[in-house]
Amino acid sequence: MLNSIEQKVLGKKRITTDECLYLYENAELGYLGKLANYVREQKNGNYAYFNRNFHIEPTNICVFDCKFCSYSRLIKNKEDGWEMSEEDILNKVRSYNNQPITEIHIVGGVHPHMGLQYFASLIKKIKDIRPDVHIKAFTAVELEYMCRKAKVSYKEGLSILKEHGQNSLPGGGAEIFDEEIREKICKDKATTAQWLEIHETAHSIGMPSNATMLYGHIEHYMHRVDHMNRLRNLQDKTGGFNTFIPLKFRNKDNQMSHVEEVSVVEDLRNYAIARVFMDNFPHLKAYWPMIGRNTTQISLSFGVDDIDGTIDDSTKIYSMAGAEESNPALSTNQLVEMIKQAGRTPVERDTLYNIIKNYDIISEIGEEVQ
Ligand code: V47
Ligand code: SF4
């Protein structure tokens, strides 16, 4: 079977869900790396993308209680959590006024008092300060809650946010689509069908999005295959996804701390299989604050072509869950060096993968990298 899978991949043919499961169960790391690297280089050459962004997490107070989440504080334990005021948020945006960031990533807990109108007006105010910046905001879980509370359809809710300046959706909240596993780790929040419908609706009104998969907890390989297959099918229909982002489950300080984390070998195998299976996703992202700088560098040889952004110490989701990066921030210079050391060409992109700077060309013509 490995031989026929290899022939398909080299012939740019799609592999089936059974073949994907076979790879998870049987293929060793070196073999997978070779296949994934072939696909990666066909799609993205030697480029390794990053962007200049920062995160705003308006609150970690959440009406839901996902078992893997180390970050949220239930509304009943409100005093342990944080809530940024609108002025705090706008001041944070103003603090980047002289910096060439291209993206603001806004996600947080699902707060019962921060609704659609509040966020729409917030986005408008952010855009008034930085009209040039792309706003990637709100997971499908936050959007489902906002629309339900505001009694509007997903299309109406998303259109309001779009009119106020929101450009795209991040990929969070997908977790694992299998309904039985979802019931065990994050019951009550947006269902699989709702997550997929919200992304489909966003694509239909011209808002692209990303997709994630939380892996390495109580799911089995077949659940990862099922998850990626549902995304691949939706992408066939809409073409609206930019990037697939596998997220490794981290076990510190959450209700699933007894579940052991998977190995780095498993992380790399997972990236490689995702790259081979998700043939209609243009990009595969390793989110560096989650897996650390070393694994991120190696992932660039296992299918990954994007390592997210400078982030500037502005997210707590992973440090609170035990990720290597306790204060995630890398200067552009550090990201560029990290990529070069891995033998790839550093390319700064915007959210939609338009090239802003190719750092190989720039260093060849002697321009200073800042
Ligand atoms: O949906 C929460 C994950 C996600 C843990 O679109 C955890 O560019 C591991 O989706 N261990 C939110 N993961 C973050 C997210 C994201 C991040 C970076 C870039 C983009 C993008 C999207 O974080 C949640 C959940 O799957 N998460 N807790 C944990 N203990
Ligand atoms: Fe809330 Fe998101 Fe954490 Fe779930 S993962 S508890 S929805 S913040």
Image (cartoon, helix red, strand yellow):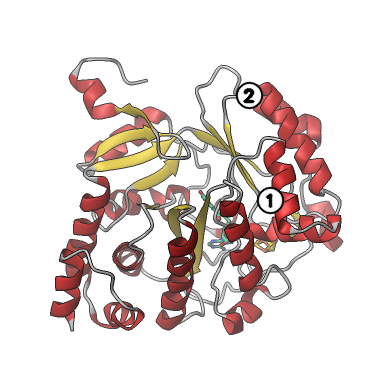
Q: Secondary structure at mark 1?
A: loop
Residue under pointer 1: 108
Q: Nearer the viewer, residue 253 or 21?
A: 21
Q: Disc 2 designates what residue?
A: 130
Residue 155: % across, % down: 70, 54
Kindly identify the residue that appears in the image at 65 percent across and 80 percent down.
Answer: 183
User: What percent of the width, then of the height, locates residue 350?
Assistant: 45, 34
Q: Is mark 1 within 8 Å of ligand 2?
A: yes
- What is the x, y in percent for residue 160? 74, 44
Q: What residue lies at 28% left-to-right and 70% top-to-bottom?
A: 14
Q: Which quadrant would the C terminus be assigned to in this image?
A: top left
Q: Nearer the viewer, mark 2 or mark 1?
A: 2
Give whichever of 370, 242 is nearer the camera.
242
User: Which type of secondary structure does the marked residue at label 2 adopt?
Assistant: loop
Q: Nearer the viewer, residue 253 or 86?
A: 86
Judge whether 81 appears above or below 365 on screen. below
The amino acid on which the numbered mark 2 sits, given as a three-letter code, is Arg
Q: Using the image, determine if residue 255 lies above or below residue 94.
A: below
Q: Earlier in the sequence, mark 2 or mark 1?
A: 1
Left or right of 351, for residue 30: left
